[in-house]
Image (tube, helix red, strand yellow):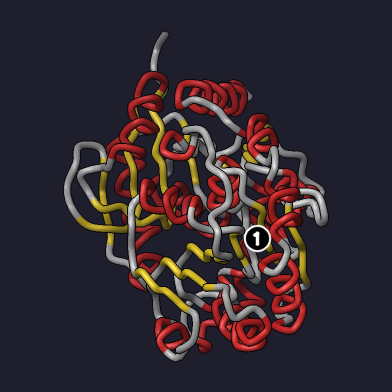
Amino acid sequence: MTRRRVLIVGPTRYSLPLGESLRKKFDALGEHFDYRVLARGSGEEDGFRLLPSGLRFYAELPARLAGELRSFRPEAVLAQDPHTAAAAMVARTLARVKAPIVLEVHGNWRTAARLYGSPARRLLGPGSDVVAAAAVRRAEGVRTISPYTTRLVRELGREPDGVVPTFTDLDPFLIPPVPLPERPVALFVGVLEHYKGIDELAAAWRLAAPRVPVATLHVIGRGSRRRVVEDLREQVVWDERTDSAGVAEALDRAWALVLPSRSEGMGRVILEAFCRDRAVIGSDVGGIADLVRDGENGLLVPPRDPQALADALVRLLSDRELAERLGSGTRADVEPLLASPAEYARRLREIVDAVVSR
């Protein structure tokens, strides 16, 4: 089978050389594609061109993309969000190259200017929305990753060319699950940023902790909102970082995962929790609501509502039977979403082939 030449572009941050999980993904992609990656990050590896982060990334992107289009001459461009897809559309005009663009929708593009970065970035929101919507409508192909992202695309009158979940390496989480520990623990895993709802979690824990004095909140993550966690004094354990095996061990020591995000595309950590037969307390938003069924495998609460989140934490952490019931069998919910690297790459190739043939 002849490999197709594709240029992959997006705001993903890479630290090169690739780690084991990403190596599995790109080795599988290499079976179908001769790829070049233009993204953010540091380090060196064949096939990767990395740019600085921040506004400089987007400022330099159209010109750098145009250069890659001229030199690499890809058969297609895989853009990992609507804004980089828009930059690719500008770049191919500059380069006078007609490579079709396959846009990947991993989450709600409207949050990019509103929930990330500095407050001043929110001023870009209206213009950012217009650019992203135009990119979704004009891209030659669209790939979504979940029912939620598919709904976002359909709201703009566009039908996705395929729904292909992003490859998630869950091997460290697929060993047989263990029973709940004796003491109740709620686990948060994620970056300490505004959009992850870390402020709401801190406020909720201050309300919940006195009502469940034997319980602990375990936080794993780092970010610009670290002070929010530092100010939590009671019944809190904080680890700034760990690897996948460490997250699996932390889930085994917990009764439930808590994910109070203001926006979420897929929620990989939910899949990890389900693999360990742990319930999830999550915000009723986006991809979380695709995976968590209230009262069946977790509890859903309104976003940005610390009191509702506190009540859910108290309800689950004070009732072992409830925690066991909600977590029992959650691994079965993950099975339809599991795909090998080879299956992920094959399905992506099908979309690219269909778009190029048009």
User: Which residue lies under the disc numbered 1?
Assistant: 108
Q: Is residue 120 left or right of residue 209?
A: left
When the figure is inspected, residue 163 is found, relative to residue 323, above or below; the finding is above
Nearer to us in this view, 143 or 136 = 143
Q: Residue at x 66, y 82 (%)?
A: 208
Residue 38: x and y in percent read: 34, 48
Residue at figure coordinates x 49%, y 80% from the top left: 235
- Residue placed at 53% from the left, 46% from the top? 272
Quarter placement of the N terminus: top left
In the image, is residue 74 above or below residue 212? above
Image: 196 above or below 49:
below
Q: Is residue 190 above or below residue 72?
A: below
Is the residue marked by circle 1 packed among few (<14), some (14-19), or many (20+) residues within 10 Å?
some
In the image: residue 177, left or right of residue 13: right
The kind of secondary structure element at disc 1 is loop
Please count the marks in the image: 1
Q: Can you tell which quarter of the image residue 72 is in?
A: top left
Judge by depth and name the residue closer to the eye, 300 or 114. Answer: 300
x and y percentages locating residue 193 in the rendered image: 49, 75
Would you say residue 105 is visible in this rendering? no
Q: Please, what is the three-letter code of the amino acid marked with disc 1? A: Asn
Q: Give the x, y percent position of residue 49.
A: 26, 48
Judged from this view, the residue extending furthest toward the top is: 1
Residue that lies at the very extreme toward the left in this rendered image: 44
Say left or right for 252 vs 139. left
Quarter of the figure that contains the C terminus: top right
Instruction: Please report the residue visible at 37 percent of the width from the left and 19 percent of the height from the top.
Output: 31
Q: Examine the rendering and report whether any part of residue 80 can be seen.
A: yes
Q: Nearer the viewer, residue 155 or 101?
A: 155
Expressed as whole percent of the image width and height from the top left, the position of residue 240 reads 34, 69
